[in-house]
Image (spheres, helix red, strand yellow):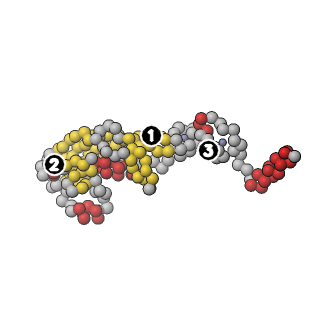
Amino acid sequence: MLVELSKVIFHEGYTMQQDTKLDLTEITVQGEQFPVLAADPVELTVTNSGDSVLLIQLQGKVSAVLPCARCLEDVKYDFPLSIERSVDMKLSAEEMEESEEEYNFIEKGHLNVDQLVANELLINWPIRVLCKKDCKGICSRCGANLNLGDCGCDREELDPRMAALKDIFSKFKEV
Ligand SMILES: [Zn+2]
Ligand SMILES: [Zn+2]
């Protein structure tokens, strides 16, 4: 959602506060898309702290759906949001682009709240998630989810030579 900033930009000392609904429904992380659940509005406060500097504060919570690192089942991962950014609105679009700070959430006098939140998710993106601490993962042979019960496969890691021997033995058995 885009929030118009002109009123707060032109009134020094002015504070704008509003609950804002996010439109963010997915996020791309390293070329992969993940669903984002953002049902609850976030609390946005923008203050003109003088000299055209805006203090942007955002509080709230969103969740993303990630696959469990072991069994690949969906896991809901919560991101508590507590964002605080200071933006000098005297900077030109070029200056913002060239800056080391990320200002991609400012668009022609508007605040792109979804972009602001997306940046935060990317910074805090977990390296891996598990559906539960003791997730048993999937069977390396048949792909069954072992949390739902054992599939009965023999998953002992076999030396390839041993595997060949085992094949020979089973052939003898058939005779
Ligand atoms: Zn799992
Ligand atoms: Zn199996």
Q: Which of disc 1 and disc 2 is earlier in sequence?
A: 2
Residue 158 is left or right of residue 104, and the answer is right
Residue at 34% from the left image edge and 46% from the top image edge = 24
Q: Is residue 39 visible?
A: yes
Question: Amino acid type of disc 2?
Answer: Val
Residue 9 screen position, x and y as percent? 16, 52
Assign ligand 2 to one image quadrant.
top right
Q: Are marks 2 and 3 in contact (CB under 8 Å)?
A: no
Q: Secondary structure at mark 1?
A: strand
Q: Secondary structure at mark 2?
A: helix
Q: Secondary structure at mark 3?
A: loop
Residue 97 screen position, x and y as percent? 28, 62
Residue 70 screen position, x and y as percent? 56, 44
Residue at 59% from the left image edge and 40% from the top image edge = 145
**Residue on which disc 3 sits:** 143
Of the pair 29 and 124, the residue shown nearer to us? 29
Give the Cα separation between the discs numbered 2 and 1.
Answer: 36 Å
Q: Is mark 3 within 8 Å of ligand 2?
A: yes
Q: Are marks 2 and 1 in contact (CB under 8 Å)?
A: no
Give the Cα separation between the discs numbered 2 and 3.
Answer: 56 Å
* Number of the front mark, 2 or 1: 1
Question: Amino acid type of disc 1?
Answer: Lys
**Residue on which disc 1 sits:** 76
* Number of the front mark, 2 or 3: 3
**Residue on which disc 2 sits:** 8
Q: Are marks 3 and 1 in contact (CB under 8 Å)?
A: no
Question: Amino acid type of disc 3?
Answer: Gly
Classed neighbour count for the residue bearing mark 1: other residues with Cα under 10 Å, few (<14), some (14–19), many (≥20): some
Residue 82 is left or right of residue 130, and the answer is left
